[in-house]
Image (spheres, rainbow, N blue to C red):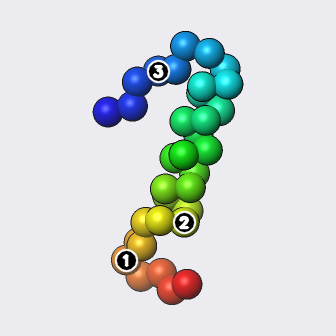
Amino acid sequence: YITKPVTFSAMVDVMKALNKYWLEIVDLPGTQK
């Protein structure tokens, strides 16, 4: 689960982490790097 950040800067950090996870770490089926 992702908890809702209280501050805007914390929300930005969460969004950056999600972006890094989905766009860099996860190896989705059917995609080539």
Q: Residue 29 got which mark?
A: 1
Q: Provide the residue designation for mark 2.
A: 24
For residue 12, which numbered disc appears in the image? none
Q: Is residue 27 above or below residue 2?
A: below
Question: Relative to 27, does residue 1 appear above or below in the rendering?
Answer: above
Q: Secondary structure at mark 2?
A: helix
Distance between the alpha carbons at the discs numbered 2 and 3: 23 Å
- Please state which amino acid type lies under the numbered disc 2: Glu
Q: Are marks 1 and 2 in contact (CB under 8 Å)?
A: no
Of tags 1 and 3, the one toward the viewer is: 3
- N-terminal of the pair, mark 2 or mark 3, is 3
Location of mark 3 (residue): 4
Q: CA distance from mark 1 to mark 2?
A: 14 Å
Residue at 62% from the left image edge and 15% from the top image edge: 7
In the structure shown, which secondary structural element does the residue marked by tag 3 occupy? Answer: loop
Give the percent coordinates (x, y) of residue 8.
67, 20
Picture coordinates of residue 17, whole percent (x, y): 54, 46
Q: Nearer the viewer, mark 1 or mark 2?
A: 2
Residue drawn at x 49%, y 56% as measured from the top left: 21
Which residue is more in the foreground, 31 or 10? 10
| Mark 1: amino acid | Pro
In contact (CB < 8 Å): disc 2 and disc 3 = no
Question: Residue at position x 43%, y 66% from top?
Answer: 26
Quadrant in the rendering for residue 13 = top right
Sequence order check: which comes first, mark 1 or mark 2? 2
Q: Quadrant of the C terminus?
A: bottom right
* 13, 19: nearer the viewer: 13
Give the residue at the far bottom of this rendering. 32
